[in-house]
């Protein structure tokens, strides 16, 4: 889930954004960020995938990647029909475009945030090595 993914996220890594594998997971990440006392997108930008209806309704509205679902369905049917007509035909690769819907959950990193986080991570690694 998004909560599990975020809890594994190392705030000291220098990362300023999380790309979740689905909008549902991204919504969980936003919740976890808030539970840590951080803000989206102030401290961490969050991007989802799928553009589910809830993505535009949550606060902040979720930046997400949209897949061309109708085109995917049409391509799948075409490929299936081709295989049924000619079972020995070689595999076919289909590449479809996606698009990014930029909403409120992303922003440029605050000046110095990545460098500050990287220094914290370095200090943690040094302390752990001792």
Image (cartoon, helix red, strand yellow):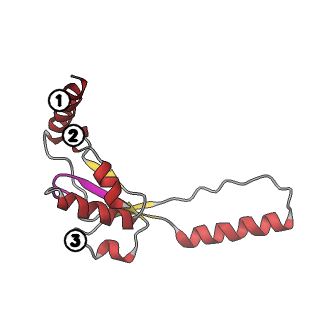
Instruction: Give the position of the N terminus as an image quadrant.
Output: bottom left
Q: Residues within 10 Å of mark 2 (few under 14, many from 20)?
A: some
Left or right of 76 in this view: 58: left
Place residue 122 in its image quadrant: top left
Is there CB contact under 8 Å for labels 3 and 2?
Answer: no
Please report contact status of discs 2 and 1: CB closer than 8 Å, yes or no.
yes
Q: Residue at x 16, y 58 (%)?
A: 39
Which one is earlier in the sequence, the residue at label 3 or at label 1? 3
Q: Element type at marker 1?
A: helix
Q: Quarter of the image for the C terminus: give it.
A: top left
Residue, disc 2? 12
Q: Is residue 107 above or below residue 31?
A: above
Q: Residue furthest front?
A: 130
Dot 1: within a 10 Å radius of its alpha carbon, few (fewer than 14), some, or many (20 or more) residues?
few
Determine the residue positioned at 28% across, 76% down: 57
Q: Position of residue 71 (x, y in %)?
A: 58, 69
The Cα atoms of the two marked residues, 2 and 1, are separated by: 9 Å
Q: Which residue is mark 3?
A: 59
All told, the count of numbered labels is 3
Q: Secondary structure at mark 3?
A: loop
Segment colored magenta: 39-47
Residue 58 sits in which quadrant?
Answer: bottom left
- Residue 11 higher or lower than 75, as above or below: above
Asked if residue 62 lies in the magenta stretch, the reply is: no
**Which residue in the structure is indicated by mark 1?**
123
């Amino acid at each position: 889930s998004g909560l599990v993914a975020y809890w594994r996220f190392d705030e000291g890594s220098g990362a300023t954004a999380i790309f979740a594998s689905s909008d549902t997971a991204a919504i969980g990440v936003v919740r976890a960020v808030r539970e840590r006392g951080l803000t989206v997108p102030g401290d961490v930008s969050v991007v989802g995938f799928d553009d589910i209806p809830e993505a535009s309704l949550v606060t902040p509205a979720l930046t997400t990647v949209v897949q061309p679902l109708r085109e995917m369905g049409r391509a799948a049917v075409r490929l299936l029909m081709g295989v049924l007509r000619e079972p020995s035909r070689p595999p076919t690769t289909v590449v479809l475009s996606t698009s990014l819907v930029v909403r409120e959950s992303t922003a440029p990193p605050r000046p110095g945030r990545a460098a500050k986080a990287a220094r914290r991570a370095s200090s943690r690694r040094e302390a752990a090595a001792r």
